[in-house]
Image (tube, rainbow, N blue to C red):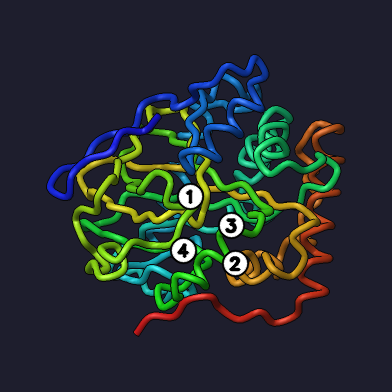
Amino acid sequence: MATQTSTTSTSTSPSPNITTSSTDPYTAAREALDRDGFVILSATLFPSFDLPSLRAAATRLSTSARTGEWPYIRTLPKQFPPWPQDTSNGIWGVQHLLHPSNPEHDLFAKSYFDSELLKYVAALIESEEEDLTMELYNMLVRPERDFELRWHRDDIPASASADEELDRLNKPGYHAQWNLALYDDSSLVLVPGSHKRARTEEERCAEPYAKYLPGQITVQLKAGQVAFYNNNILHRGVYDCTKERMTLHGSIGTVKAGSERARNVLQHGVGEWAKEDDFGGLEEGMREQALRMRERLVELGRKSGDVGFFSKEE
């Protein structure tokens, strides 16, 4: 169980945070996610994760992004899409790892469509594997200068009332979101349990970049560990420009979500190229699953049309 702290200090997450009597690892992971809002798993569980190869590929792609050769990026100082393509202030993310024009996309696809990962995703969102939908696969990288994200929930605006927050929090999430750390990563800060309640008055009145909130923890990931977390947990990112960071940031959904999930996914532009990728570099069984998941994403885009952007900044 994650520990809590005062408003003047922060703690680190246990690793892992699975504490259950269940002998089924998928049930245990789901119980931890439901309880704390996050769960940490070892990459040794996932047979298609090749950490050295992923590091090498991530290094090449992040170099291309920093030099402007790879156009799909998250640029400083903007938190939400759309992101300007001007790299003069630096970048903090690389988008669309599965894009067919990425020379490394087959390697990243093997980690995204890993059979064991899909089993955990299905268990975490209580879905059948045949209903899973391809969503996003991006990378969070070391910025050129220190950079922080504001406290937020991914698809609940800060202006939401307590009743509006609870209305959304009480609905199924219909997707799993995770960070796979290729290097040790201590960038994710969150408030355990906040995915099950509205913000307190102190949280609601806090500065957007408040250094501390009651009970917050810093999630400490060792290289190779995976953190699944509820995207509507109260969280932020704190990025240190002196520490190498290459963390694969993915999400997978389910057909149950329908249009409710469409904006958060399609605002990143994945629908513009997903149908072009045939995943020809994957082994046959994995490729068939990838194509089915891709088609569900394409269908989501077809039905949803222009969804716009969830959050805009000045």
What residue is shown with label 3? 96
Quadrant (top left/top right/bottom left/bottom right) for the N terminus: top left
Apparent side of residue 24 relative to residue 18 in the rendered image (left or right): right
Task: Name the N-terminal-most of marks 2 and 1.
Answer: 1
Task: Name the N-terminal-most of marks 4 and 2.
Answer: 4
Q: Is residue 265 above or below residue 133?
A: below
Residue furthest left as drawn? 8
Label 1 secondary element: strand
What residue is shown with label 4? 73
Q: CA distance from mark 4 to mark 2?
A: 17 Å
- Categorize mark 3 by other alpha carbons within 10 Å: few (<14), some (14-19), many (20+): many
What residue is shown with label 1? 139
What number is the disc on residue 264? 2
Q: What residue appears at the point 73 percent right and 30 percent down from the top-left corner?
A: 115
Q: CA distance from mark 1 to mark 3?
A: 8 Å
Task: Name the N-terminal-most of marks 4 and 3.
Answer: 4
